[in-house]
Amino acid sequence: MKYYSTNGKAPLATLQKAVVKGLAEDKGLYMPQSIKPLPQSFFGNIQNLSFQEIAYQVADCFFGEDVEADALRKIVYDTLSFDVPAVRVKDNIFSLELFHGPTLAFKDVGARFMARLLQYFIRDLKDSKDLKEVNVLVATSGDTGSAVANGFLGVEGIHVYVLYPKGKVSPIQECQFTTLGQNITAIEVDGVFDDCQALVKSAFIDKDLNEHMLLTSANSINVARFLPQSFYYFYAYAQLKKLGLADNVVACVPSGNFGNICSALFGKRMGLPINRFIAANNENDVFYYYLQTGSYYPKRSVQTIANAMDVGDPSNFARIFDLYHHSHAAICADISGATYTDEEIAQTMRGCLAETGYQLDPHGACGYRALQEGLREGEVGFFLETAHPAKFKQVVDDICGTDIEIPARLQAFMKGEKQSVSMSKDFASFKAYLMSL
Ligand SMILES: *Cc1c(COP(=O)(O)O)cnc(C)c1O
């Protein structure tokens, strides 16, 4: 399978190049040249398959031409070492719990898959060329850093640099990537998430840097991170089908950089019978505004209590735009939007807990509320519970008056000592730092 750039000015790339380079030469995002549909027989029997088997069949459509079957199966099975249950919260609303992985957020899926695929390709490169170390640069608004850092921790031949906005990630999130050591370096940037993302993007197109070191990205712009996220939409459908509730399904995705919902839209192209999608936003409402008006105006992100969604210029908008051939009408036919203030998010968390006993995190709360407000007669909806509420313990406890328990695997991170490099948001100093390595 070949990959083209959303900007249309870069040569077609192999999967290996798309994964190792991350971003195309023209700054566009890679897209697979074709999206293979899965056969009807697969959907007919999907409720009887395991998560791992479903995921392997989906992965085969994207990666089967480029990765040997045995290796791909192993990558998929190793990646999905945890369950993603669809839990009924009330009536026709389900929570797809994506927080049972090592860092308690959905990004574990893409990050673990990418680490394994990159390792596979590096082995390949080592045979053919002189390989320097591969350097993974990743900007994080909170959860990406921990998922990527943990996904790559101790992987030979790869060094990870995590850029995060100073003072804008929760202490629990921060310790998940600043205490690891080994092949992980945390870089604390004096700015917001968009500044971190801009530094990473500039590094990829800087000629000197690219001559100096082999750079790749593990943000959701990387095809190896975002495509595997489609796995759990198929599995959610399978679980609803098993309950006889899959005739009219709505998926609601709390969205920031729009990688997660974008992978769901790829799933639909492969035949996944999800009727429609809702993109739930916090106050960072650039996409919501686009749906209403047809105009896309990136903005500076504002800080909210759902901080992993504080994105003012979502990277994957370019992919959604491309997937729908730039048609606003076609996008609106599949996706609707919602946007919530911090106060609305807080009300939703308290209301849901009182009414159902289910503890939402601030991101999942946006998804739950959008379903509650937007689900129509006869529809069954699932929202993505994108992170465990304990990752945002202070905020959650303050809002709900609770003292939620911190899972043991999260506590383990909090015992480590913080190590990080401080950086200003201007590219010259970041470049100088990388050049000195
Ligand atoms: C990253 C993240 C999101 C946003 O996902 P995108 O793919 O960037 O849209 C939502 N919730 C949590 C908890 C996250 O970590």
Image: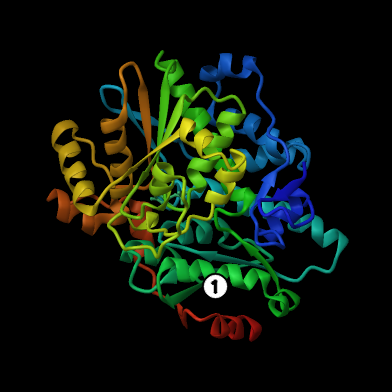
- Residue 51, relative to residue 408: is it above or below? above
Q: Which residue is mark 1?
A: 199
**Residue 435 lies in what quarter of the image?**
bottom right
Tell me if residue 319 comes above or below residue 266 in the rendering.
below
The quarter of the rendered structure image containing the C terminus is bottom right
Q: Is residue 427 left or right of residue 195?
A: right
Looking at the picture, how far across and down is residue 85, in whole percent? Answer: 40, 32
Q: Amino acid at mark 1?
A: Leu
Q: How many marks?
A: 1
Q: Residue at x 52, y 45 (%)?
A: 109
Q: Nearer the viewer, residue 178 or 154?
A: 178
- Which residue corresponds to the image point at 12% horizontal and 50% vertical from the top-left? 401
- Give neighbour class at mark 1: few <14, some 14-19, many 20+ (Cα, 10 Å): many
Question: Residue 239: where, in percent of width, then height?
Answer: 44, 23
- Residue 220 position, x and y percent, is 55, 53
Q: Residue at x 65, y 57 (%)?
A: 28
Q: Quadrant of residue 115?
A: bottom right
Left or right? Give the position of 365 relative to 384: left
Residue at 30% over, 30% down: 374
Asked whether residue 225 is in view, the answer is: yes
The N terminus lies in quadrant: top right
